Amino acid sequence: MLRVTLMLAVPVAAGLVATQLLLPRIAARRLAEELRSSGDVDLVRVRAMPALKLLFDRADSVEIRMSEARAGTGRLADLLDEARGAQRLDAHAARARLGPLLARDLRVFKQGDDVRAQAAVSDADLAAALPPGTGLRPIEAGGGELILEASAGMLGFRAAVRARLSARDGALVIAPDGLLGAIGSLTLFADPRVQVTGVDARRASGGFVLAAHARLASVG
């Protein structure tokens, strides 16, 4: 009886070891293939203990390294929603094109449902993304919002106006100060799956570093 038990236990144990080794690699390979449609992937690593939880879209951690990412804000929301089952997400892109804007050293961290993202934007890259003759620079940050000064020239005249980049009802919104703020605002990011809770910024050499805090929302 003992011999039979041992004979059965050996292949079962071997199967569990093989599953633990293979399933994370398969999951990482599939994720890498999906990400290649929107960037240059250097590394994808998936960890899960036990690995069988991957069959139920659960993981302990997901690590992503990309040399360049080419995606809009909608694709970023897709990535965060797909990583909902991972307890921890650590994603980094050396260069990221978000529409016309080139951001560098983009980092996205997720722990549970809490998300933090930050990226460096140079003054030159910001100027290149704006219409000719338009200027935009951050002048103050704090209290979960970023104050910017925008300027534009027309017919030999230049006008400057201040605007606030902040979280409003879960969206990332920029609105001019004063009476113009009551007239209209521009929504930069809005997705029911990701609720933005605050923004922050600091000056850096030749530009600034922008950070955003968010939380994954339950969407029925």
Image: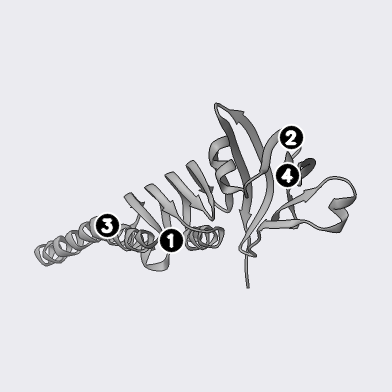
**Mark 4 or mark 3, which is nearer to you?**
4
Query: Which amino acid type corresponds to the residue marked 4 in the rendered image?
Result: Ala
Query: Residue at the location (11% across, 64% down)?
Result: 7
Mark 1 or 4, nearer chain start: 1
Helix, strand or loop at disc 3?
A: helix
Query: Residue at the location (55% across, 60% down)?
Result: 77
C-beta proximity under 8 Å, tags 4 and 3: no
Q: Residue furthest top?
A: 205
Viewed as shown, does residue 57 lie left or right of 141?
left
The residue indicated by pointer 1 is 58
Helix, strand or loop at disc 2?
A: strand
Helix, strand or loop at disc 4?
A: strand
Mark 4 or 3, nearer chain start: 3
The residue indicated by pointer 3 is 25
**Mark 2 or mark 3, which is nearer to you?**
2
Viewed as shown, does residue 61 lie left or right of 158?
left
The residue indicated by pointer 2 is 142
- Where the N terminus falls, by quadrant? bottom left
Q: CA distance from mark 1 to mark 4?
A: 49 Å
Q: Residue furthest right?
A: 179
Query: Which amino acid type corresponds to the residue marked 1 in the rendered image?
Result: Arg
The residue indicated by pointer 4 is 152
Which label was assigned to residue 160? none
Query: Residue at the location (52% across, 57% down)?
Result: 76
C-beta proximity under 8 Å, tags 1 and 2: no
